[in-house]
Amino acid sequence: MFGKAKCKLCGDNVRFALRHLKKEHPETLTDKDVVKLNMSKIMEKYFL
């Protein structure tokens, strides 16, 4: 039903993208530009 996305930063296959960013790459979510993005833009930027 739901597929996994591949993280562009570390190459992991993840099911929950925001949880992965918060846990493994917290520095990405502190960036002011990323905070303004919606979920589809975050998926394009950090996941395949």
Image: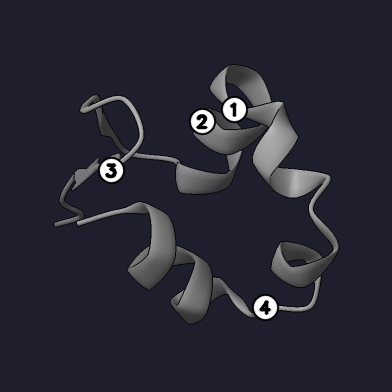
Q: Mark 1 or mark 2, which is nearer to you? A: 1
> Does the CB distance between marks 1 and 2 fall below 8 Å?
yes
Of the residues shown, which amino acid type is indicated by label 4? Leu
Q: Is residue 39 left or right of residue 33?
A: left
Residue depicted at x 63% and y 80%: 38
Say which element carries label 2. Answer: helix
* Res. 26 image quadrant: top right
Q: Is residue 46 left or right of residue 6?
A: right
- Above or below, comparing residue 23 to residue 26 in the picture: above
**The label number, if any, that marks residue 20 in the structure image:** 2
For disc 3, the marked residue is: 8
> Does the CB distance between marks 4 and 3 fall below 8 Å?
no
- Locate the C terminus by quadrant: bottom left
- The crowd level at tag 3 (other Cα within 10 Å; few <14, some 14-19, many 20+) is some
Q: Nearer the viewer, residue 1 or 19?
A: 19
Residue 16's spot in the image, x, y percent?
44, 41
Q: CA distance from mark 3 to mark 2?
A: 12 Å
Say which element carries label 1. Answer: loop
Q: Nearer the viewer, residue 21 or 27?
A: 27
Q: Mark 2 or mark 4, which is nearer to you? A: 4
- Nearest to N terminus: mark 3 or mark 2: 3
- Above or below, comparing residue 40 to residue 30 in the picture: below
Of the residues shown, which amino acid type is indicated by label 1? His
Of the residues shown, which amino acid type is indicated by label 2? His
- The crowd level at tag 4 (other Cα within 10 Å; few <14, some 14-19, many 20+) is few
Q: Mark 3 or mark 2, which is nearer to you? A: 3
Residue depicted at x 57% and y 36%: 21
Q: Is residue 27 left or right of residue 30?
A: left
**The label number, if any, that marks residue 25 in the structure image:** 1
For disc 4, the marked residue is: 37
Q: CA distance from mark 1 to mark 2?
A: 7 Å
- Above or below, comparing residue 15 to residue 45 in the picture: above
